[in-house]
Image (cartoon, grey):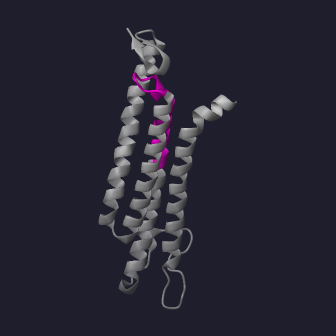
């Protein structure tokens, strides 16, 4: 069991960091939504949230728009996290099969890319809540990490498949011989 815990530490830690991003996004969405009140202190956006039925009064436009941006931001963070988790795990598990990549190097890559993804998610959240245009820096960093995991998982699976079917011989730390 100790070996399994050791092997799965990096992707598990990256997963937790990514899930904290969802929690942060949910908290930000709830805060923005409940801040939307009319002059009498009544909530403008009751449960269930229906953006298409939001009040159209111009004096509430800014808080209603911010609540809608927060809703879209939360949905985006959830979608991206759930799309990225499998690729991150595939890279973390199979990356050590790649030539010249040790398990320790793969753990460092997994932890660093997971931390970068989480920081980019935080940038995306705070930027989007401020204005739609300010979300792009965090979004683009997160997209690049997602692309790294997606293309990395494809490369890892291709190489591991080549080893599995005897096209190449995998060795310690991914060293190859044909």
User: Left or right of 7: which side holds 102?
Assistant: left
Q: Which residue is drawn at 52% across and 56% down?
A: 22
Q: Quarter of the image holding residue 12?
A: top right
Quadrant, the N terminus: top right
Q: Nearer the viewer, residue 1 or 42?
A: 1
Q: Residue at x 50, y 67 (%)?
A: 28
Q: In this view, does 74 lie above or below 65?
A: above
Image coords of residue 79 (percent x, y):
46, 50
Prevalent SS, magenta region: helix
Position of residue 3 relative to residue 18, above or below, is above
129 falls in the magenta region: no
* Residue 83 visible, this orientation: no
Eyeballing the image, is 34 above or below 121? Answer: below
Residue 154 falls in image quadrant: top left
Pinpoint residue 91: horizontal percent, then vertical percent. Answer: 46, 33
Residue at the image position 44 percent from the left and 38 percent from the top: 109
Residue with the most extreme bottom position:
40
Question: For this rendering, which residue is in front, 9 or 151?
Answer: 9
**Residue 55: percent from the left, percent from the top?**
43, 79
Which of 83 and 172 lies nearest the eye of the viewer? 172
Q: Position of residue 103 (x, y in %)?
A: 50, 29
Please indicate whether residue 139 sits to the left or right of residue 81 in the image.
Answer: left
Task: Give the position of the C terminus as an image quadrant.
Answer: top left
Which range of residues does the magenta coloring cover?
81-102
Answer yes or no: is residue 21 visible. Answer: yes
């Amino acid at each position: 069991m100790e070996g399994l815990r050791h092997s799965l530490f990096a992707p598990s830690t990256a997963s937790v960091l990514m899930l904290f991003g969802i929690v942060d996004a949910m908290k930000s969405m709830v805060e923005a939504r409940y801040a939307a009140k009319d002059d009498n202190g009544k909530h403008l956006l009751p449960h269930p949230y229906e953006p298409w039925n939001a009040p159209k009064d111009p004096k509430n436009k800014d808080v209603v728009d911010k609540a809608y941006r927060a809703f879209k931001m939360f949905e985006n963070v959830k979608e991206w996290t759930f799309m990225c988790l499998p690729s991150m795990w595939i890279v973390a598990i199979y990356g050590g099969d790649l030539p010249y990549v040790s398990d320790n190097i793969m753990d460092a890559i997994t932890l660093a890319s997971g931390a970068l993804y989480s920081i980019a998610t935080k940038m995306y959240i705070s930027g989007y809540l401020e204005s739609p245009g300010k979300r792009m820096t965090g979004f683009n960093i997160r997209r690049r990490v997602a692309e790294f995991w997606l293309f990395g998982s494809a490369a890892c699976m291709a190489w591991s498949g080549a080893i599995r079917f005897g096209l190449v011989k995998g060795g310690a730390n991914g060293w190859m011989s044909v």
